[in-house]
Amino acid sequence: MEFISNLFKSKGKQVSSTLEAAKYKGWTKEQLVKKLLELEDNENTSNKLEKQLKKRKSNDLSSLKSSKKQKRQKEFDFSKYHTRFIALKFAYLGWNYNGLAIQKDYTPLPTVEGTILEAMNKCKLVPSMSPQDYNFSRCGRTDKGVSAMSQVISLNVRSNLSNEEQLNPLKDSDEIHYVDILNQVLPADIRISAVCLRPPSGFNARFSCYKSSLQVFIRKKNLDIEKMKIAAKLYQGEHDFRNFCKLDGSKQITNYNRTIISADILPINGDFYCFDLVGSAFLWHQVRCMMAILFLIGQGLEEPSLINLMLDIEKTPRKPIYDMASDVPLILYDCKFPEMNWSQPNLEDYKAIKYGKAISSLVLKYSTKATIAQIFEDVLPTTTQEFPNKTRINLGDGKGKIVGNYQKVSDRPVMESVETVNKNFETKKGWRNNN
């Protein structure tokens, strides 16, 4: 019984040797071990229940404290404040965002607009995350990864001033400092650069913009820049660009005519150039498709005449299948509006200086990474050789797409017509509505 006694003592049990001797005397070793395991299970279960009970009490107490705290905090009542219609100018690096426009559905990365509206909602400048609640409009959408240097939105926001005071420029200093406040809470790669407190009558950030300037950065390596310059000029004027965009039935677009004011290939620095494009408006993915064709021409895979062929919808009524250029080198450089009075932050102000340093820090970080990446490339063995009997199509991302036998764009399979794409969406939409 010494074995039994030692086992139960290790579990902190007070066992009477006489009683235990009578109870366990005839048990085998296996029976005793089984009994001990049962006791251990019971104790573990008891400990778990005790811990769960303590945790539940702790959570209930925390919830009670939180509830009391929330009751003490009064909900912000927007109805007690004046509002005013303003326009905001801002810039962003789009590499960490899922495009500009806020989305109803989940996106793997945040959107630029969603980030801005979250900041405005946090600062109690807007009452919700629903743009329709405050007359919101944007100058133009940008795709995932695309950056912008001069984007514009317009909307109604909370104001410190009465409607009458808002009309008086002498009262502007008493207004909420929208730029400074937002730049304090926004990430460094999104910056508000100016505010217009009194936009023109009927102003709309989308429809009041009469032209936009976009740029795509190009590395000269293995490209015939002069040939690309000749080709770029062919985009100028008013054309039907259905073969240079993404066809989307949900938008039900029937007019693909757009006017390109100017198109050129300009030097930037060293080995870099840019496709500089100015137009009145652009279709979805239009610039990336235009750039993709320019890359093919610059590589000598196509002739500039391909652009004329694709712009002629009688000869090319359906879009040939080809890959778009990369989104990373693309920026929305500028947007032009009627005369507006833009107010910039006081650059000598403490807050402007403090949060301006965030930009310097961001630029230093990316510059340092670029330098280290270049050293990384320099120290590794590299080759200029390509795969034999293969063609690497330049997409502007440094990697491209490798194909076997290159097929001319004019000989490739084509997508469905615009009319078919629109009709298919309508049919599918009707099916969904009926189910």
Image: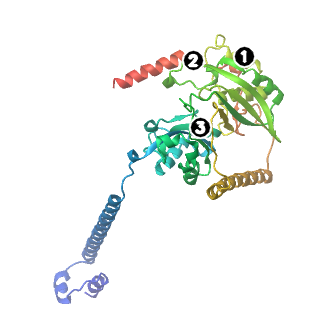
Nearer the N terminus, badge 3 or badge 2? 3
Q: Position of residue 3 (x, y in %)?
A: 29, 85
Q: Where does the C terminus fall, quadrant-wise?
A: top left
Nearer the N terminus, badge 2 or badge 1? 2
Give the labeled residue for mark 3.
152
- Amino acid type shown at disc 2: Asn
Q: Which mark is residue 255?
A: 2
The picture quadrant where one finds residue 379 is: bottom right
Q: Is residue 233 visible?
A: yes
Of badges 2 and 1, nearer the viewer stands 2
Q: Position of residue 217 (x, y in %)?
A: 73, 37
- Amino acid type shown at disc 1: Asn
Give the labeled residue for mark 1.
308
Q: Is residue 156 visible?
A: no
Position above or below: 156 against 235: below
Position above or below: 268 against 120: above
